[in-house]
Image (cartoon, rainbow, N blue to C red):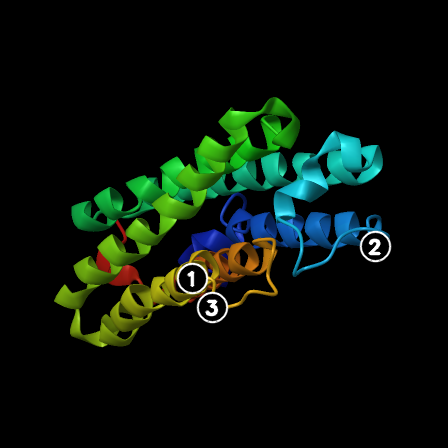
């Protein structure tokens, strides 16, 4: 059996679990470079990059990047859920699937769309940490993955700390929420890439069909 047959995520669409977040990070970086005249990490939200009134090229790149990222990761998540047989893990990934739908909605309903943008943004940042917790708690059943469980359970608290600090005024020089947003995003990306890495190495054979 070839290495690719042993590790199905090396074939399409498993690799989308890696490519999806890269698309988001690149689109954010490009949008920022196009918005250097006004964007600051301390004074803006990332969603300001998607506001068409702040610059059409940057907004298009940012919003299309988020939509494409969400669609790529939805394909990966669907593929991953079909490939595993562990019901608790499948259930644990439901909030992540919901978060990806919200991510697509953020790109579709930019700041220009009004209050709906706020709701989908809150939905995104509030939903996927629960997937990390649920999957992490489920993996406590497997002794060899206790380290992964601890990472999954602890990691969301970094973003919670950042958001609480921002809302509580611990960082008064942060008038925008771009830093808590990117911190939360990186926790989710790191967790997703860790899952992909374990799956690609066939380390998750205990839950694979």
- In this figure, which residue is indicated by the disc labeled 1? 159
Q: CA distance from mark 3 to mark 1?
A: 14 Å
Which badge, 2 or 3, is on the more N-terminal residue?
Answer: 2
Q: CA distance from mark 1 to mark 2?
A: 25 Å
- In this figure, which residue is indicated by the disc labeled 3? 170
From the image, state whether disc 2 or disc 3 is nearer to you.
3
Residue 76 seen in the current view: yes
State the image coordinates of residue 1 (x, y, percent, origin top left).
42, 60
Question: Tags 1 and 2 in contact by the CB under 8 Å rule?
Answer: no
Placement of 43 over or under 57, stated as above or below: below
- In this figure, which residue is indicated by the disc labeled 2? 36
Q: CA distance from mark 2 to mark 3?
A: 26 Å
User: Residue drawn 25% across and 61% down?
Assistant: 136
Q: Is residue 37 left or right of residue 173?
A: right
The image quarter containing residue 91 is top left
Q: Secondary structure at mark 3?
A: loop
**Most foreground residue, 120 or 168:** 168
Q: Secondary structure at mark 2?
A: loop
């Amino acid at each position: 059996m070839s290495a690719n047959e042993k590790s199905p995520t090396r074939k399409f669409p498993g690799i989308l679990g890696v490519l999806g977040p890269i698309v988001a990070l690149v689109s954010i970086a490009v949008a920022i470079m196009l918005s250097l005249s006004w964007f600051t990490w301390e004074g803006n939200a990332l969603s300001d990059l998607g506001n068409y009134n702040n610059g059409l090229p940057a907004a298009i790149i940012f919003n299309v990047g988020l939509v494409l990222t969400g669609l790529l990761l939805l394909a990966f998540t669907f593929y991953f859920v079909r490939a595993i047989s562990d019901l608790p893990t499948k259930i644990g990934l439901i909030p992540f699937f919901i978060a990806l739908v919200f991510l697509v909605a953020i790109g579709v309903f930019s700041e220009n769309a009004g209050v709906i943008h706020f709701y989908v943004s809150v939905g995104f940042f509030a939903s996927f940490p629960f997937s990390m917790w649920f999957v992490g708690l489920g993996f406590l059943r497997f002794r060899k993955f206790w380290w992964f469980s601890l990472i999954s359970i602890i990691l969301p608290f970094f973003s919670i700390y950042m958001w609480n600090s921002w809302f509580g005024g611990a960082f008064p020089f942060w008038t925008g929420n771009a830093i808590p947003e990117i911190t939360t995003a990186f926790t989710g990306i790191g967790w997703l890439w860790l899952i992909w890495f374990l799956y690609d190495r066939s380390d998750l054979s205990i839950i694979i069909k």
